[in-house]
Image (tube, rainbow, N blue to C red):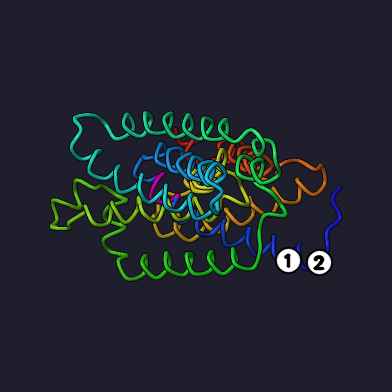
Amino acid sequence: MIILPYQIILTVVIGACLAGIACSLIGTFIVRMKLSSLGFCMSHAAFAGSALGLVLHINPLSMAILFSIAVALFLGPLVEKAKLHADVILGIMFSLMLSLGLIFLNFAPETAMSSTAMGILWGSILGMNTSDIINLTILTSLIIVLMILFSKEFKAIMFSRKMAEASGINTRPFYYLLLFLTGITVSLSLKLVGGLLVFALIVNPTSIVCQFSYNIKKIILFSPLCGIVCCLMGILLSFLFDFPVGSSIAIFSSIFFGIAVIFSPKRKRG
């Protein structure tokens, strides 16, 4: 069991709550729009950017953000213009980003097994600091404000993008905004959860809540709460057994999802 000073524990808990809220709010769009591959793709884009930062001796977080934004800007037009389903494009980009990340680490053998590199891969309890808390607070607040200001448009898009367009809503700016916010959210959550598993924090909480409700308002409300619980329980598991924090969050949220499926009223009705 890890014993840490109170200040570090408080920072980790606050960071976990903010990451849980931000990732889960983004997850409501990704799950409802059936774009789970987007979570995989952007998480590995952030991982590749961080790895490149290690090679170039540049702040890994800055490179993760830049890489994620670049991929998001590239994905938007590509998905719309390619004559393939979005998941196909995202699946190709996912494998490309993972491959690039591993290649970049291979170019920096002296840091490939360092604590920084391992934190990028799997997350770290000691990774969060005050600046990360501030960044996550700003991001979470921005996501909430945008969802309030454009609640009508976002709900319509989550229900059906084609129907939203038929009703006169220009969905393209909102789709691009979703890509951008996903990239930033993944990058800022990287230190806590790690690039290889941050998609679990995006997809799992909303998937759990969706087992119990079809109501979009309830899904948006309860997904962040579920995300917070998954983060805190994952951190507790990491404290107790000295597991990587990203793995602990992914394990707990997956178990929680399995339980939700068993007790889901949707399954019983089916």
Residue at horizontal 61%, vertical 43%? 253
Residue 208 visible to an observer of this rendering: no
Residue at horizontal 37%, vertical 33%? 93
Q: Is residue 103 left or right of residue 117?
A: left
* Residue 110 x %, y %: 67, 36
SS at mark 1 in the image: helix
Query: Callout 2, which amino acid?
Result: Tyr
Residue labelled with disc 2? 6
Distance of label 2 from label 1 (alpha carbons): 6 Å
Q: Residues within 10 Å of mark 1 (few under 14, many from 20)?
A: few
Residue 166 visible to an observer of this rendering: yes
* Residue 36 x %, y %: 42, 39
Query: Callout 1, which amino acid?
Result: Leu
Q: Is residue 164 left or right of residue 246?
A: left
Residue 10 has which mark? Answer: 1
* Residue 230 x %, y %: 63, 50
Q: Is residue 221 left or right of residue 81?
A: right
The reply to whether the C-beta atoms of the residues labelled 2 and 1 are less than 8 Å apart is yes
Please state which of residues 42 and 21 is positioned toward the viewer in this rendering. Answer: 42
Residue 22 has which mark? Answer: none
SS at mark 2 in the image: helix
Residue 99's place in the image compared with 226, above or below, is above
Q: Main secondary structure of the magenta part?
A: helix
Please state which of residues 261 and 195 is positioned toward the viewer in this rendering. Answer: 195
Q: Quadrant of the C terminus?
A: top left
Locate residue 177: give its quadrant: bottom left
- Residue 29 on the magenta span: yes
Please state which of residues 153 and 81 is positioned toward the viewer in this rendering. Answer: 81
The magenta region covers 27-31
- Residue 201 on the magenta span: no
Residue at horizontal 79%, vertical 49%? 239
Q: Is residue 247 left or right of residue 46?
A: right
